[in-house]
Amino acid sequence: MHVSILYRAPSGEPGPADDGIVYAKNTNLTSGLRPALYLLRENGSTRGTFALITDGDANVEAEHLPATVQEAGRSGARIHTIGIGNNGDTGYDPATLSTIARSTGGRFQSAHPLEALCNALDKAA
């Protein structure tokens, strides 16, 4: 499983390809959000839009997720969340992704089948 966060600068220009992309064996949504916060701080931005795409439930550092989401909301990060694949016991948790999106002014979308991922990314852009 992996977690990715893609960065789009407030100007609308995409960030460099290596900015904020995190891959992990387990699903650590907290570490997927931290690069977004880092990028905002480093760029001196008060707002930014991000897409958090995951195929899994938060199973690493889950205890830090609520505080990280609150920090994201305060920082001006708008995070759109996209769950890919199956939800529930074998995949992502829609309630968690909805909470992240709602807390930051973003939108949650489910992307199954894969074609839906392209549509979800278009809506988040």
Image (spheres, rainbow, N blue to C red):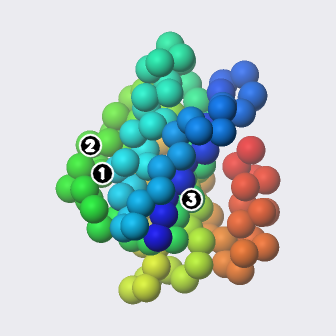
> Secondary structure beneath disc 2?
helix
Q: Residue at x 26, y 43 (%)?
A: 67
Q: Are marks 3 and 2 in contact (CB under 8 Å)?
A: no
Assign a secondary structure to mark 3: strand
Seen from the viewer's position, the closer of residues 104 and 121 is: 121
On screen, residue 46 above or below 25: above
Helix, strand or loop for disc 1 = helix
> Crowding at label 3, few (<14), some or many (≥20) Cα neighbours within 10 Å?
many
- Residue identified by numbered label 1: 65
Rendered position, 101 above or below 15 = below
Of the numbered discs 3 and 1, the one sitting upstream in the chain is 3
Q: Do the residues labelled 2 and 1 touch (CB within 8 Å)?
A: yes
* Quadrant in the rendering for residue 35: top left
Q: Nearer the viewer, residue 109 or 89?
A: 89
Q: What residue type is labelled 2?
A: Ala
- Residue with the mark numbered 2: 67
Pointer 3 and pointer 1: residues touching (CB < 8 Å)?
Answer: no
Residue 29 visible at all: yes
Q: Give me the C-alpha separation between circle 3 and circle 1.
A: 15 Å
Q: Quadrant of the C terminus?
A: top right
User: Residue 64: percent from the left, percent from the top?
Assistant: 24, 49
In this view, the residue in front, 53 or 102, is: 53
Cα distance in 3D space between marks 2 and 1: 6 Å
Amino acid type at image mark 3? Ile
Quickly name the residue at label 3: 53
